[in-house]
Amino acid sequence: MALGEFDLIAKYFSRPARRSPLGVGDDCALLAPAPGMQLAVSSDLLVEGRHFLSTVAPERLGHKALAVNLSDLAACGAQPLAFTLALSMPRVDEAFLDGFARGLYALADAHGVELVGGDTTAGPLAICITVFGEVPAGRALLRSGARAGDDLWVSHPPGGGLGDARLALEMFRGTVAVTPDFERLRLAMECPQPRVALGVALRGVATSAIDLSDGLVGDLGHLRERSRVGAVVDVDALPRSAALAAQPRARQLECMVSGGDDYELLFTAPSAQRDAVHAAGAAAGVGVARIGRIVEEPGLRLVDARGEPVRGGFAAFDHFATP
Amino acid sequence: MALGEFDLIAKYFSRPARRSPLGVGDDCALLAPAPGMQLAVSSDLLVEGRHFLSTVAPERLGHKALAVNLSDLAACGAQPLAFTLALSMPRVDEAFLDGFARGLYALADAHGVELVGGDTTAGPLAICITVFGEVPAGRALLRSGARAGDDLWVSHPPGGGLGDARLALEMFRGTVAVTPDFERLRLAMECPQPRVALGVALRGVATSAIDLSDGLVGDLGHLRERSRVGAVVDVDALPRSAALAAQPRARQLECMVSGGDDYELLFTAPSAQRDAVHAAGAAAGVGVARIGRIVEEPGLRLVDARGEPVRGGFAAFDHFATP
């Protein structure tokens, strides 16, 4: 059965709206942030082959497309409210849409965020989600607030760490042998969990934050640049899963430091806030690891547990670089 | 010179932000609508081959990508404030980016709207813009407000009309012979002018509105459905350019009725508001033509100037239909 564009929207993407006065189906969605609140907005475009592999299950893709946007809100300490979805796909594939919508709505429901508008069109598979959250005026976590002397922290799954998504990607690429952990690693790559509760709990505690999408080196670079500071990172303090810890050390570092797709929060806080950071992590149900410190001298220095410099040309993940 | 993703953003898409407390470069943009205002949001994804031809000049593409989004705000009677841009392209092409940014910013400046965030990635050429406007709470123009007895109106360029974009497309396709008007028709297709001022002027005058992106039949269908009404359209009252009027009548009707890509406003108003509608058009510098009326009986009837039914299976433009 061939469904037209509008039937499609109606069938998969119409649910009663609670927060938007209009919901899906008019030219615009209407949003009204509560008094004293600022609206935080982020938009991400995911395309096949760059942000996901063609082998991904539609349900996981629906999850991930929203997750990476919620992760941006988390990095600002914003509480998610609503999102729009613009979807381009080669043909009307109901099996795909059914799974995609299921994964999308499951995560949306988990975070109390609703679809308020969108656009579907024929074309290469591409997903653009714009997400809206609210944060009390002046209390958003920014990339620009890190100060020399601050601790540097990263969140991680309980019992897990950074780099699992990259390790899974390398197993897909065949550069690393598949291990019995593969399905769990694949889940890290395909179903990242946005650290929304942690972001909200870090308001007034953290001095700056960013989410790890392009890898530690790259995203810490953005944070350093916006804050005009340098950083020292102890690579031995980086949290890692047992699966990654079983890899050779060079591979571990590459995955944790340049990996990308972690969607953990990288943030800074004064050392007086260490207890508060641990409390925020505990309240949010995620691990928090202190991995270094902010310094005045520009640049990034990677050191080991003894303070010795770590060699290796670690790069940020660049979507335009040849894979 | 190979530019990375982040240099790219910085080079072409960083300008000082006036309205957003942050501007481009953090995880989220922050927006704060004025007290009593609702935020109107719309998101459109444009992909090559469906929404634009590969022959389009980058500058015109930059214009059009923003124009179609501003047109959605216009249809809600919202005043544009800001937008985000997510861009996927096969490679870093500075000539393309330079032209694209020029066209985009020219239209943004004309409407006082600023870029507040975005995302760039490698992939097929695709452009997702999400636009934000504000409208006094409860005063947005909706698709659902049309009432039986209302007049049906459409905006048009001074001296022009509907269907020029479709006529240009047919000339590109080779199904219609190219005429000396080709460059002007092409401009209608590639550089639509969003009717923002008209939308704002129609607050409190129009009972419903929608912008014409999928063609008169299709978009009037959305309006009828949301308002639960029928409509009668006098095809002889449809505004048309001299270039289109020189085509055979069947071609004229096809272009005006099923064409798509007009980005004019289709709206309804009580007959007592006729003077107010003309005043709104004059204030906005655009033509307004009364093309029919809203009726209780569901469905759409196309008639000629004598009230005789017009035959012909006119369809809405469907992005998933085979071109």
Image (spheres, coloured by chain):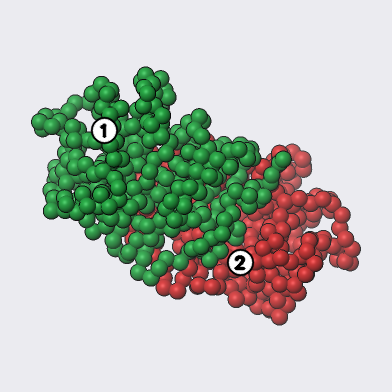
Chain colours: A red, B green
Quadrant holding the C terminus of chain B: top left
Instruction: Report which residue position mark 1 lands on.
Output: B240
Question: Helix, strand or loop at disc 2?
Answer: loop
The answer to whether residue A24 of the structure is visible from this angle is: no
Residue receiving disc 2? A142
Say left or right for B133 vs A252: left
The residue located at (41%, 29%) in the rendering is B183
User: Relative to B205, is B212 above or below?
Assistant: above
Write down the chain letter for disc 2.
A
On screen, residue B205 versus residue A212, left or right, reads left
Above or below — where is B160 with respect to A288? above
Q: Is residue A18 left or right of residue A133?
A: left
Q: Residue at x 39, y 65 (%)?
A: A32
Q: Residues within 10 Å of mark 1 (few under 14, many from 20)?
A: many
Q: Picture coordinates of residue A88 (x, y %)?
A: 48, 40
Q: Quadrant of residue B97?
A: top right
Residue situated in front as seen by the camera: A263 or B54: B54
Along the viewing direction, whichever of A290 and B125 lies nearer the viewer:
B125
Q: Residue B182's image quarter?
A: top left
Numbered tag placed on residue B314 in the rendering:
none
From the top left corner, tell me how far across and down residue A50 is, in percent: 63, 42
Q: Looking at the picture, does residue B105 appear above or below residue B232?
A: below
Residue B128 percent location from the top left of the image: 49, 46
| Amino acid type for the residue under numbered disc 1 | Arg
> Who's the residue at 33% across and 32% down the image?
B164
Q: Position of residue A156 (x, y in %)?
A: 68, 62
Q: CA distance from mark 1 to mark 2?
A: 52 Å
Q: What residue do we see at 68% from left, 78% from top?
A: A273
Q: For the residues carrying marks 1 and 2, which lies nearer the camera in this image?
A: 1
Give the crowd class for mark 2: few <14, some 14-19, many >=20 residues within 10 Å. many
Q: Quadrant of residue B184?
A: top left
Residue type highlighted by circle 2: Leu
